[in-house]
Image (cartoon, grey):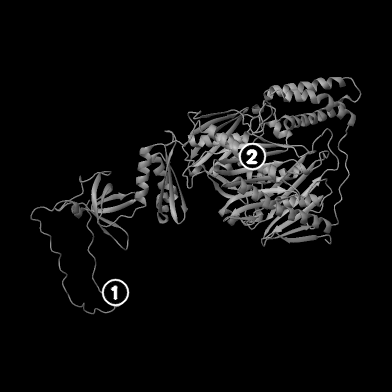
Amino acid sequence: MSNIHTLRFDTGDGKIIELETGRLARQAHGSVVLKVGNTMLLATAVSNYDAREGIDFMPLTVDYQEKFAAVGRIPGSFHRREARPSDYEVLISRLIDRALRPLFPEDYHADTQVLVYLISSDENHLPDHYAGLAASTALALSDIPFNGPISEVRVARIDGKLAINPLRDELERADIDMIVSGTMNDINMVEGEMSEVSEADMLAAMQFAHEHIKIQCAKQLELVEMAGGRKVREYSHEVNDTELREQVISACTPEIRAVAESGKPKAERRDATRAILDNYLLRFEGAEYADLKKTLTKKYFHEAEYYAMRAMILDSGKRLDGRNATQIRPIDCITDYLPAAHGSSVFTRGETQALATVTLGGKLDEQLLDSPMLHGYSRFMLHYNFPPFSTGEARPMRGTGRREIGHGNLALRGLKKMMPADYPYVVRIVSDVLESNGSSSMATVCSGSMAMMDAGIPLPKPVGGIAMGLITDEGSDKYAVLSDILGDEDHLGDMDFKVIGTRDGITACQMDIKIHGLKWEMVSKALQQAREGRLHIIGEMEKAITTARADYKSFVPRIEVVKIDKEFIGAVIGPGGKHIQELQRDTNTTISIEEKDGMGMVEIMSKDGEGMRRALEKIRGIATMPEEGQIYQGTVKTITDFGAFVEILPGKDGLLHISELAWERVPSMEGVFTEGDKIEVKLIEVDKKTGKYRLSRKALLPKPEGWVEREPREQRDRGPRPDRGPRNDRNDRDRNRDRGPRPPREHND
């Protein structure tokens, strides 16, 4: 244990980060424990020394997992153990992956795995913005080829002031919340949400974050030196043929560029490009090392595509579909497309199309969140689906992938900022991407916004999204910022920058950078150009729908929320849920109750207006205390010899004594009432000891003419009772008295 090395440093705001290596997971190629407060992360990095045969890319796996023991909880799953990653864990895995992946050498193809575990948490120091630092440190301590280090920080603006890695409870006051990743020289990943902030404010937050990223990268290098310095393994995972590369690029580039400049649709362009490759591969039929040459040719052909497209854009300003750098593809918007859905829309932009549906539900439809750091319920959900036919492919569907979770979460963050506060419904948005040629997540934002307004959700403003791209020239300062990028421009370009917002500001963003040397002026230009494109897109959306429906569609269930004193919650529910179940059955409603802010919140959902009215009436009755002197319309529940029990409010019965039926004497209850009769009664007394209610019908009837109230009888004063001795003595005298034999009982046969 003598090779343990520990480094502590201040993040600049009083938080102390501790990095320790050499104690845990020593058989991993690199491992580190990061500690801040009581939150601890264990990060490991392992890579095979040989690449698998036939692999021409880097098989990188990045996983983040939270241990329930870290927060002192047992998993709520059936097996009571950590199972498949939650969406939250997948999103953090993606944050780490997107920051690390561009920094591995292109010719390194060995299976590599980076794992980050949350092993302790005080729940106030959020782990997501420390996970990238831990993963990068593990890689830096290993011999795995890696052009890092990188680090990630959370930058938030709280009460008008920028802060790095704020505590969880501080984030509640933030109007900017972003995680930014980068190296000593560049930023390479951004993701976050904002409350309609300006482009200038967002850029300032990114620059502020990068200054702190530089500090954390330097500390990683310092720890590596403490541990003996970095030694990178030797590897040879690629076979190259320089002569063949030059031949392929020289022969194919002119034809590829001609196809790129043709402005053909995606499918035609793809087929024409594939024909060029297939024609070139024919020359290797029957040749020596034909398979190897074909494999290398495909690789070099892709390079030719890369350079041809970039050169075309930088030289002429013309793009693959014929647009210039700032043009947006043609947009078509339809709302209320699905007549049976609560809300729906179709958003088509060029060859990208998203069908969005909105469903409104009640409290019982809330999503249960059961992970160590996210435990509770969600009332706003957005699910993004990307079926294979959207790109003209046939492939198996294996459930929701990480990309779908990530794209859905980005769209959700952009839209939820416009959700009205205390909205009574649970909202689920589903976006099915039916066609895709770039920016499908931004199409999801646009279609989701319109579907929400079609459903009657009172959004104050429509929300739009746009994806920006970047093409640079390594040999010069030339660059082009592209609005509304195509799939190929994303794949062959240097940046994918998604910006979501309203006319008044940005609500969410996501950026991935693939190059070194990104200049802030490029980011600034991309933000300004994105704003212009976003305003154009929102203008097209407003041609279909400008404001939310004035009322929900007729088949949408209505929701009413009633506040009651928490002492009445039990009375509404009843023993074993008896009362609430009967109430739901009798009124055809769905009712849920929770205690919030010291009050009982009763939510009633129903498609039946009359049922809603009766449920409201009954619940308000249960939660109301009868007042002495008030008159009530009651229901006869039970009839006895001495009177009737009348329900004056739901669950509250009072005794109407036979003497209070009328001014004249009523000799018997027989034939006076039938159970279920509606009668008007007055509450004349509430017993202060028992809480019982005494009712009168007589008090509501006019007195008979000449009626004289009977004088109450006076109690005679009998004076003090004579002393008869102790009770025990009296009992003894009585028992000892000889009363003689008892007469026999008579029986009536």
Q: Is 74 in front, or is 742?
A: 74
Where residue 271 sits: x, y (%)?
73, 22
Where residue 513 sits: x, y (%)?
72, 41
Q: Is 366 in front, or is 293?
A: 293
Q: Give the residue at the far left of this rendering.
A: 706
**Residue at point 81% right, 34% down?**
56
Residue at label 2? 498
**Is 603 left, or right, of 154 in this rendering?**
left
Q: CA distance from mark 2 to mark 1?
A: 98 Å
Where residue 742 sits: x, y (%)?
24, 65
Please name the amino acid that badge 2 sits on: Lys
Q: Secondary structure at mark 1?
A: helix
Q: Foreground mark, 2 or 1?
A: 2
**Is 339 left, or right, of 436 in this rendering?**
left
Can I make out residue 27 in this image? yes
Residue at label 1? 731
**Residue at point 66% right, 49% down?**
206
**Is 743 left, or right, of 1 in this rendering?**
left
> Dot 2: within a 10 Å radius of its alpha carbon, few (fewer than 14), some, or many (20 or more) residues?
many
> Dot 1: within a 10 Å radius of its alpha carbon, few (fewer than 14), some, or many (20 or more) residues?
few
Asked whether the residues under the numbered discs 2 and 1 touch, taking CB atoms below 8 Å apart as contact, a structural biologist would say: no
Q: Secondary structure at mark 2?
A: strand
